[in-house]
């Protein structure tokens, strides 16, 4: 039918576009549903492996194999990181990337049961749900690949396999290597206890290991001959704790003593502490960091020891993008949440008994949180550096029982149950729909880029917080 006025033509085009998107949406959702078991098995396999940052060889290979099977080309070992890779499918513009993580956290062990139960011999676990992150993102990328084929659309979908998010800043090295330079937008997600797609930020973060070297001696018969490296560590910690009163309230300072000596009757000649410093603004963070380093210098001077420190990682805060966040929220709302089975309810109620809030209530649907802007998490992520390089959007999915925090045994336990699997599939669907929306409506990409440039500012120049160091491939071996 011929349109008789421009207004009717626009209306006709809009109806056709909405109808087309509705059809495409159903096919994308069906694609992911048809792979539900495959994605579940993949996430469980990575959960079982529980490989820590930069050591995720088998986890990385599992994701690459899943994508290779679907026809993606793979570039492995990018940014001088053996476990980092970029998988690509399609050709031309736009280029839409989906990120996936897969590193576990050391120092935690837990079976997939609702009570504390360690797994013998296991020293790491997916307490932040990155096994679901990687598998769910791969599922989204595959669904988008199928849509490109089915519709014969021009464009490229990429999957970025990003290792060592937990304190290793894998994405920062990928940014530095220019791997995102030709990408139009980046989509990601993270496991959580709610389904949401807010336009939110995080804290910038820098970390380092401070190593002091002194002189050993017998702690009882000749203590005067010794210069205690442990004294230096404790002196630094004391001064940093005094510093807390004199930094902005949004600052976060935390540390562990990674080496305090071997035995009390020997004055330790080496000792080490591992520090994280966080703040919403990377410029303020640099100033606070210099003050922390000054305490380390003073500690060395006061104890007669020498200091050496190694910056391990550094992340920018996430740069929000309201334009993209609203699109992702709409698609997440289209997918909706999910309902617990009777078995899920039993598991969730047992977990709830161990949480401070006891948040779960029988029968409550796991829906989608209303959209908000201007929120800020007190956590940090190397997604931040990506977001200052290319327009980026993220979401969270309820893979944990409501009220569960990240980096806990409760998060590990739920991550290998249907609760975790269902949340992962929600994320895969919302990400895939968001990518298809952007392929079909490229004016959104232009609007998102305009917002991106406005938020960054005309004089922005990227400079990694971790400097020019090479990837710390052994930072989890120490």
Image: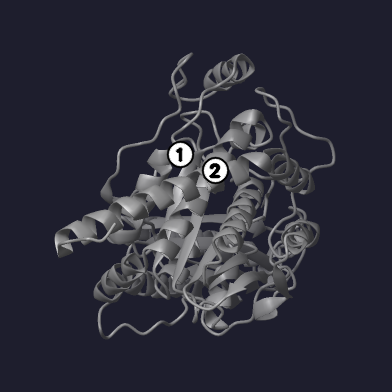
Residue 199 is at least partly visible in this image: no
Q: Quadrant of the N terminus?
A: bottom left
Q: Quadrant of the C terminus?
A: bottom right
Q: Splitting the image into 4 quarters, where does residue 3 fall? A: bottom left
Position of residue 403 relative to residue 60, above or below, is above
Position of residue 185 relative to residue 120, above or below, is below
Relative side of 45 to 99, left or right: right
**Picture coordinates of residue 451, whole percent (x, y):** 27, 69
Is there CB contact under 8 Å for labels 2 and 1?
yes
Q: Splitting the image into 4 quarters, where does residue 350 fall? A: top right
Under circle 1, the secondary element is helix
Q: Splitting the image into 4 quarters, where does residue 168 fall? A: bottom right
Measure the alpha-carbon separation of dots 2 and 1. Answer: 8 Å
- Which is more toward the observer, 327 or 122? 327
**Picture coordinates of residue 116, whole percent (x, y):** 68, 26
Residue placed under numbered mark 2 in the picture: 29
**Going by the picture, which residue comes out furthest to the front?**
1
**Picture coordinates of residue 233, whole percent (x, y):** 57, 63
* Residue at horizontal 47 percent and vertical 59 percent from the top: 435
Residue placed under numbered mark 1 in the picture: 335
* Residue at horizontal 55 percent and vertical 33 percent from the top: 400
* Residue at horizontal 60 percent and vertical 20 percent from the top: 344
């Amino acid at each position: 039918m011929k349109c008789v006025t421009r207004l009717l033509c626009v209306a006709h085009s809009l109806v056709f576009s909405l109808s087309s998107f509705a059809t495409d949406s159903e096919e994308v959702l069906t694609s992911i549903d048809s792979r539900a078991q495959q994605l579940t098995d993949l996430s469980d396999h990575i959960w079982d492996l529980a490989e820590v940052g930069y050591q995720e060889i088998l986890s990385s290979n599992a994701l690459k194999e899943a994508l290779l099977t679907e026809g993606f080309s793979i570039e492995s070992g990018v940014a001088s990181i053996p476990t980092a890779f970029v998988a690509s499918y399609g050709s031309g513009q736009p280029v839409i990337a989906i990120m996936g993580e897969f590193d576990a956290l050391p120092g935690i062990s837990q079976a997939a049961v609702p009570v504390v139960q360690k797994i013998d011999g296991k020293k790491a676990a997916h307490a932040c749900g990155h096994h679901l992150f990687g598998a769910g993102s791969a599922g989204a990328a595959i669904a988008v690949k199928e849509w490109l084929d089915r519709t014969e659309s021009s464009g490229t979908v990429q999957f970025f396999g990003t290792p060592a998010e937990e304190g290793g800043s894998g994405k920062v090295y990928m940014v530095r290597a220019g791997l995102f330079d030709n990408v139009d937008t980046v989509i990601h997600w993270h496991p959580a206890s709610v389904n949401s797609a807010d336009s939110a930020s995080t804290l910038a973060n820098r970390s380092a290991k401070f190593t002091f070297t002194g002189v050993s001696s017998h702690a009882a018969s000749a203590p005067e001959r010794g210069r205690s490296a442990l004294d230096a560590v404790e002196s630094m910690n004391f001064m940093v704790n005094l510093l807390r009163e004199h930094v902005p309230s949004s600052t976060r300072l935390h540390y562990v003593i990674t080496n305090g000596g071997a035995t009390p009757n020997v004055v330790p000649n080496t000792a080490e502490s591992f520090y994280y410093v966080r703040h919403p603004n990377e410029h303020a963070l640099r100033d606070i960091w210099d003050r922390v380093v000054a305490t380390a210098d003073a500690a060395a001077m006061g104890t007669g020891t020498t200091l050496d420190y190694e910056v391990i990682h550094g992340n920018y805060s996430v740069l929000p993008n309201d334009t993209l966040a609203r699109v992702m929220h709409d698609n997440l709302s289209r997918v909706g949440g999910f309902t617990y089975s009777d078995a899920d309810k039993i598991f969730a109620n047992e977990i709830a008994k161990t949480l401070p809030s006891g948040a779960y209530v029988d029968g409550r649907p796991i829906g989608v949180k209303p959209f908000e802007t201007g929120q800020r998490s007190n956590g940090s992520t190397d997604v931040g550096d990506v977001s200052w390089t290319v327009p980026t959007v993220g979401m969270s999915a309820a893979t944990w029982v409501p009220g569960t925090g990240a980096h806990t045994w409760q998060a590990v336990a739920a991550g290998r149950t249907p609760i975790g699997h269902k949340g992962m599939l929600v994320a895969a669907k919302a990400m895939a729909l968001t990518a298809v929306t952007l392929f079909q409506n490229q004016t959104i990409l232009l609007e998102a880029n305009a917002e991106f440039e406005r938020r960054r500012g005309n004089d922005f120049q990227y400079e990694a917080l971790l400097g020019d160091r090479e990837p710390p491939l052994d930072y989890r071996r120490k």
